[in-house]
Image: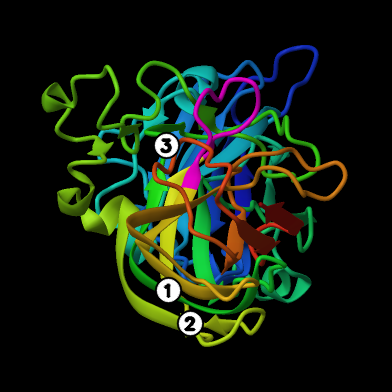
Amino acid sequence: MIACAFVACSNDDDPTPEPTPEVGTGTLIAGLDSKALTKANSSEITSLIVALYRADGSFVQSATLADNQPTEIEADNDVKFTGLPVDVEYTIVAFANMPTTFNAAQSLSTVVATPIQLPSGAYSTGGYPMSSQGIDKVTLKANTTTFYGYTQAEFDAATTEGTKELVAANSPVKLYRNVAKVNLNKVTLNVPTNEKFTSGKAEVTLDAAIILNAANTSLAADVKGAYSTNNWGSVQNLTGNAFDAGTWFKKDGTTAFAVKPDYITSESAVTYTEANYIATLTNTLNQAALGTGVNTGNDQLASFYVFENHGEASTSKTILTLRGTYKFDAITTNGAPYAEARTEAYWPLQVGITGLTDGVKDGVHRNVQYDITITITGNGNLDPTTPDVESNMFVKTEVVEWGHISQDVPIE
């Protein structure tokens, strides 16, 4: 939990101007409980910065886990501020797992607009950036220790002298992930019965799950809470070469991908950094009869962390695609054998597009987990970015745990 405590003191010998304001300085203690805040087992807090800003957005102070350890209260990973003026409204903003170049000592509008990227380990380990919103505000009182967001028990146990006050009880400053998580949970092969065939069997061998059009950067934080359905706001940043991290260039396209070696292309996909946006699969599904499905089981197949990508600003929707081979053998109604094979087939879907519950915006949003199951019903696409009228796939997507959104998407 992020919780905040302020201590104010005054010097009775100081002259008192008219009218009489509150005088003195204060001390702020902020604590972190990553599990309580993020509500996910995969959350990892490797660094924490808590910063204070005045009502006009000007910077006051920041504190880190490494350098500012308090002793006033029993809570893990606390940070401490000292020398704060009283009678001032402060906005409390927390940042976790930010790049080493991140600088909180600027105006709040500048800080939240800072573009950031995922650190290399965050693609698979969960060390992704997180931030709070600017909704946590408090005004200090002189000669009073103000505890922000603590439980009553924590407040009662705190060792302070003089008057103390509990503000925003049980409502600590919350951290929200700047990323979405895309999970491929299960794949089913189920070519349905067809009036063209009296019998048939199919085989799919999957060799990769790939994320295309992954946004390259994120903003550091959102203090406006513009996305009202989910109170963690939006940190989308689609300026410049927004999709360099996951753009797919076609073999027959006009883009000279020889000068873009860091992009995913249909030629370089196998050798692209697999820890980021390609997961190797080794699943073979054999369907013995039409209409009788077979699946990969309950073990999660792949998981990716991606930045936000939604709304009219998005020119390239984030795609999760399966890649593999496809074989189909059948007997037609006139008794003739039929065979079809694709040595490189793709089964793509747009993450977070269509099928969302009312009031939820389409696309990929921060702090949302997309749990995806795919049922393959046909031969797939020859290119993951181009619709194929002969391909068939049914996709069911449910957003769980991080956010609370449901998504059900049929694709034919």
Q: Residue 95: x and y, percent?
A: 47, 44
Q: Position of residue 24 (x, y in %)?
A: 60, 33
Q: Nearer the viewer, residue 225 or 55?
A: 225
Task: Evaluate if marks 2 and 3 touch, with contact meaning CB atoms under 8 Å apart.
Answer: no
Q: Element type at marker 3?
A: loop
Q: Is residue 302 left or right of residue 316?
A: left
Report whether residue 33 is seen. Answer: no
Please tell me whether residue 326 is drawn above or below residue 30 in the rendered image.
below
Q: CA distance from mark 1 to mark 3?
A: 20 Å
Specify start and end residues of the magenta stretch as a single range. 308-319
Q: Is residue 168 above or below residue 246?
A: below
Identify the residue position indicated by label 3 in the image: 213
- Label annotation for residue 296: 2
> Residue at 55% of width from left, 61% of height from top?
378
- For label 1, the residue is 301
| Amino acid type shown at disc 2 | Thr
Give the image location of residue 316, x and y in percent: 49, 29
Task: Kindly identify the amino acid type of the residue bearing the numbered disc 3.
Answer: Asn
Which quadrant holds residue 280?
A: bottom left
Q: Earlier in the sequence, mark 1 or mark 3?
A: 3
Residue 50 painted magenta: no
Observer-side mark, 2 or 1, equals 2
Three-letter amino acid code at the position of disc 1: Leu
